[in-house]
Amino acid sequence: MGAVDGGAKTFGTKNMNVDISPVVQSVVGLCAVALTVLGGIALQAFAAKLKVQISASQTSAFDDALSKALTYGATVADAEIKAKGWDHPDVKNAVVATALTYAVSKFPDALAAVGLSTDLTNPTNVATITAALQRALPAAMLTASASPATPPAPAAPKA
């Protein structure tokens, strides 16, 4: 009959083993590449259909609206800034909260241009605008703190 290696015969037609794993791996790899390419094309077509592209002028208008809203928030939080200083978390939270409602009421076109709405009952919308305000907060507070009308930093507590 035939030679036996580990219990399996190495010749003959009854127990012939053919390893096709390299072929399967190649086919799976090609399918993954094809799906990646097709997925990219589908995403581009979907984005074009939804008109999700944001121009530089829209981004600039949105950033300007954020800055103005944060400046307004800092103006409203003046007493808290005097008491706690610019870098206190309560001050930052108060400025962002005021800026959120101000941005939604005063700059609906700038929000709409970047795909956001003025709906403050939509948690995703609120979270997105809040995150944008928090991103813009350091630059806006730097500008506001450099203003001559800005209150001085509170005195350090005595030890």
Image (tube, rainbow, N blue to C red):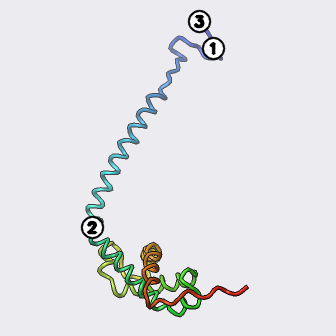
Looking at the figure, which quarter contains the N terminus? top right
* Pointer 1 with pointer 3, Cβ within 8 A: no
Q: CA distance from mark 3 to mark 2?
A: 77 Å
Which element is circle 2 on? loop
Question: Residue under circle 2?
Answer: 55
Horizontal relation, residue 80 to residue 64: left or right = right
Is residue 67 shown above or below 32? below
Is residue 1 shown above or below 37? above
Q: CA distance from mark 1 to mark 3?
A: 13 Å
Residue at horizontal 41%, vertical 88%?
72
Q: Quadrant of residue 82?
A: bottom right
Give residue 139's position: percent from left, percent from top. 44, 75
Give residue 90's position: percent from left, percent from top. 57, 84
Is residue 44 shown above or below 56? above
Give residue 94's position: percent from left, percent from top. 52, 86
Question: Residue under circle 1?
Answer: 5
Amino acid type, mark 1 = Asp
- Residue ranking furthest to the bottom: 79
Mark earlier in primary sequence (2, 1): 1
Mark earlier in primary sequence (3, 2): 3
Q: CA distance from mark 2 to mark 1?
A: 69 Å
Question: Residue under circle 3?
Answer: 1
Whether residue 122 is visible to the viewer of this picture, yes or no, is: no
Which element is circle 1 on? strand
Give residue 120's position: percent from left, percent from top. 43, 83
Amino acid type, mark 2 = Ser
Residue at horizontal 31%, vertical 78%?
110
Residue at horizontal 35%, vertical 50%?
39
Which element is circle 3 on? loop
